[in-house]
Amino acid sequence: MMSMANVWNKNKIFLTLSLILLGVLGLALICIPKGELHLLLCDRHTPARDIFYRYYTTVAEWFPYLVCIALLLFSRIGNGVLGCACMLGSALTTQIAKHIINAPRPVTWFAANMPDVQLPLVEGVRMNAWFSFPSGHTTSFFSLAFVVCVLLTSPATSHRSPTTGLIQILLFVLAALGGYSRIYLSQHFAMDVFGGILVGIFVSVVAYAVLHRFEDKKWYNYRLFNLKKQKNTKK
């Protein structure tokens, strides 16, 4: 059974990079006014970037849930339950916070506070007006990245890759790009992304803290479809 200390040690690259990003964003939020910071971060539009971020941001809307289904079907049941707990738990927390705070999105905020500013919007993207904080897409990106990191360093992983550290860096970059896509598209402020990262990682860590205690249970290690057994049978 992996202790929480070991979870930190084995996933410290991803978690450390996430904490650094939170620190940088937090410092920027303190030092730069809300509107100026948003314009600073979203003002570098090109046709290629518009296409990339328009479609990349939608990955958070379906891909994490496909991963959860795949884990439930082809991995240990516990892995699928972990994925579902992290995804659904972070999504529920985000939605509750959104509806309690009901913060304006950039298009609404700029129209009220800086009406002379024309935001660089991407054609074809439907702009939302409210429920800005925290960013749900960012939450999904970081929650999924954490789950993958944990599964890669799980005791049940039969082969430890020497590139695990590089994979953690890649997962962080992919999650960070997902968070930045929300600012680039002017769907969220930097503060919303900051909150999304916190919710995604915190809820996922809590979910793992609860579920890792059952890693030695029979139900946790049960597989609905064992591809390895199927391969051995064919041989």
Image (tube, grey):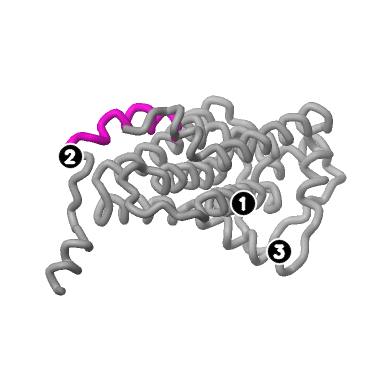
Q: Is residue 14 above or below residue 33?
A: below
Would you say the magenta stretch is mainly helix, strand or loop?
Answer: helix
> Which numbered dot is residue 75?
none
Q: List the residue tagged with mark 2.
A: 219
Which of these two is toward me, 175 or 160?
160
Mark 1 crowdedness (10 Å alpha carbons): few <14, some 14-19, many ≥20: some
* Cα–Cα gap, marks 1 and 2: 34 Å
In this rendering, the label closer to the viewer, 2 or 3: 2
**Which is nearer the N-term, disc 2 or disc 3?**
3
Dot 3 falls on a residue whose secondary structure is: helix
Verify whether residue 214 appears in magenta.
Answer: yes
Q: List the residue tagged with mark 3.
A: 49
Q: List the residue tagged with mark 1.
A: 173
- For image coordinates 68% across by 53% down, the residue present is 185
Mark 3 crowdedness (10 Å alpha carbons): few <14, some 14-19, many ≥20: few
**Which is nearer the N-term, disc 1 or disc 2?**
1
Verify whether residue 29 appears in magenta.
Answer: no
Q: Residue 169: x percent and y percent?
A: 59, 50
* Cα–Cα gap, marks 2 and 3: 45 Å
Q: Is residue 51 above or below residue 150?
A: below
Q: Which amino acid lies under the numbered mark 2 shown in the image of this protein?
A: Trp
In this rendering, the label closer to the viewer, 3 or 1: 1
Q: Which residues are magenta?
A: 204-217
Q: Which amino acid lies under the numbered mark 1 shown in the image of this protein?
A: Val
Q: Is residue 19 visible?
A: yes
Q: Residue 34: x percent and y percent?
A: 78, 34
